[in-house]
Amino acid sequence: MKTVIDGLALTPRGFIVMGLLILALLVNGCTNGTNPIQFYRLTADVDVTHTAHANKVDQGPVIGLGPIRIPDYLNRPQIMVAITPHQYLLSEDHRWAEHLDHNISLALYQVLPSQLNTDRLVRYPWAQRQVIDYQVGIDIVEFNVDAAGQARLIVQWFIKNKNNTILDKRSEYQFPGSSTDYAVMVKAQSQCLTGLGLEISQTLRQLMMADVDQGVVLQ
């Protein structure tokens, strides 16, 4: 049995083959019109020269990093641009490779040991029995790129010593980036995060040195 379409006689097998070809063309057209999703991660060591230490301190204070909290509007995979202070553009094609708060925590956790010359650093949440000498908590107030391509990070952060708050301050960092090139945007945001990490490590070193000078004994 043959099927005639516009004067072309097709057997059932030929009809199936033609249908498959048409389906392939439709799928290919849809695929060509879809951009692949790009994934990005933040770092906290942009343009930072790491000093190699022969031996890191394996005794001394234990530093706890966290909790790190972000606003709900940032708790999403899409990278966003602040078009105005009240309006944001979310990109479906450019996304964070992991939860943003986890990425920020990991980025700082990777660089602080070398900056503090110690491996005695734990991330929140830690074991209930874990003794923490200095705890660094971070609240992200604002973290995005504006319509002019300026990356901005505003944080409220604290340091506790044995559960006593010894520092509570707000810091702000800005770096030029891009509002269209997402790789440049993420690098500028990473530079902001680098500034925060450097300020935290410098502050911790000063506090720990002050405690040593005063004869404070830490585990």
Image (cartoon, helix red, strand yellow):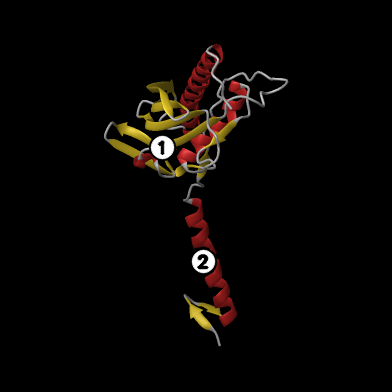
Name the amino acid, label 1. Answer: Arg
Numbered circle sitting on residue 69: 1
Q: Position of residue 59 (x, y in %)?
A: 65, 25
- Where 192 sits versus 94, above or below? above
Disc 1 to disc 2: CB gap under 8 Å: no
The tally of labels here is: 2
Question: Between residues 210 and 34, which one lies in front from this camera angle?
Answer: 210
Nearer to me, 14 or 134: 134
| In front of the other: 205 or 132 | 132
- The residue under the point 57% across, 26% down is 112
Q: Could you say where residue 83 lies in the image, as x and y percent from the top left?
A: 31, 33
- The amino acid on which the numbered mark 2 sits, given as a three-letter code, is Leu
Disc on res. 23? 2
Q: Residues within 10 Å of mark 2 (few under 14, many from 20)?
A: few
Q: Residue furthest left?
A: 86
Residue 107 location (% of width, % of height): 54, 32
Q: Secondary structure at mark 1?
A: strand
Q: Is residue 213 above or below residue 68?
A: above
